[in-house]
Image (cartoon, rainbow, N blue to C red):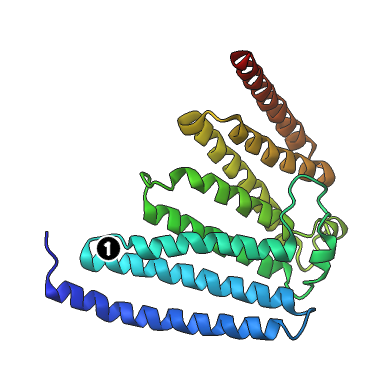
Amino acid sequence: MALSKEQKAEYNHNLTEFKSFIDELKKDVNLYKAQMKKSKAAEPYYQIAIVLNSIKFMNTCICINDLSNHTLGLKSETYLNLARKEVYSVISTMERVVGADYENGLDENREQLDAIPEFAPDQRLNFIRGFRKTVNDIIEAFGSNSKWKWSWPEIHFKLAVLAKNLFDFRAYEKERDLDSPYYYVRMDHFNLIIELSNHAAQEYRSKFDLSTSDVNDLKKCIALLEMNRKIFQITGNNDDMVKTKTLIESMSAKVSSLENKDKKKKK
């Protein structure tokens, strides 16, 4: 059905306001980048500020898509793709702040964590929650049949690793008592890491079963479960550690079996 002049006019009028807000966000980012060059110690905080602006930008793109759906009856593929690309920008920036490691120990990024003491535990938790919601909103806006469907597991993977790297396991171990002002915040953040890791592992397993049959997807599952196992080991959650270890062994056996079959085919 052809769009009326009134529909187009209403959409363009409202879009102008959103574009003005996006322009303001860009100005703020340029300011942060200029200030960042003046202080090495403050650089991580400006990076975080830029990331928060990116999340505002993504949420604005989602709002524009909602506007397009409501006014024109069409998705705004342009703005949804801008939001999707910005997700990777956020992850890349935060990896510079707290690292991207998921294979080694839980305190490998100690130097980076020590550089952001003013980024409080509750702020870190709220950041991960907010970023996850934005990511989920973008995925939902694209729909279940999107061509990007099998790229989402990678984003879930990176989100889980980011949540882990933002968490101070040393402080968690030292302050595991109800008198600690951040006791419940750290418990919530801890549980969120496990939740995000399990979800990302399930997403990669679905990708393997329904799309790729690629053992590398199962290896990503194992990497996430192994990350959880280390967390359970250091925090003394023995029952969960044993369950996770069993899952790792089962999936590792499957990977070995598939790789052996592949070698035989090649021979």
Whether 8 is drawn above or below 2: the answer is below
- Closer-to-camera residue (126/149): 149
- Closer-to-camera residue (116/32): 32
Residue at the limit of the structure toward the front, as seen here: 267
Q: In which quarter of the image is residue 93?
A: bottom right
Q: Which residue is drawn at 81% across and 46% down?
A: 104
Q: Quadrant of residue 108?
A: bottom right
Residue 58 lies, in percent from the top left, at 47, 67
Residue at the limit of the structure toward the right, as seen here: 174
In the image, is 249 to the left or to the right of 159?
right
Whether 49 is drawn above or below 189: the answer is below
- Residue indicated by mark 1: 69
In this view of the protein, can residue 231 be seen by the observer? yes
In the image, is 56 to the left or to the right of 115?
left
Residue 68 lies, in percent from the top left, at 28, 66
- Closer-to-camera residue (21/174): 21
Q: Secondary structure under badge 1?
A: helix
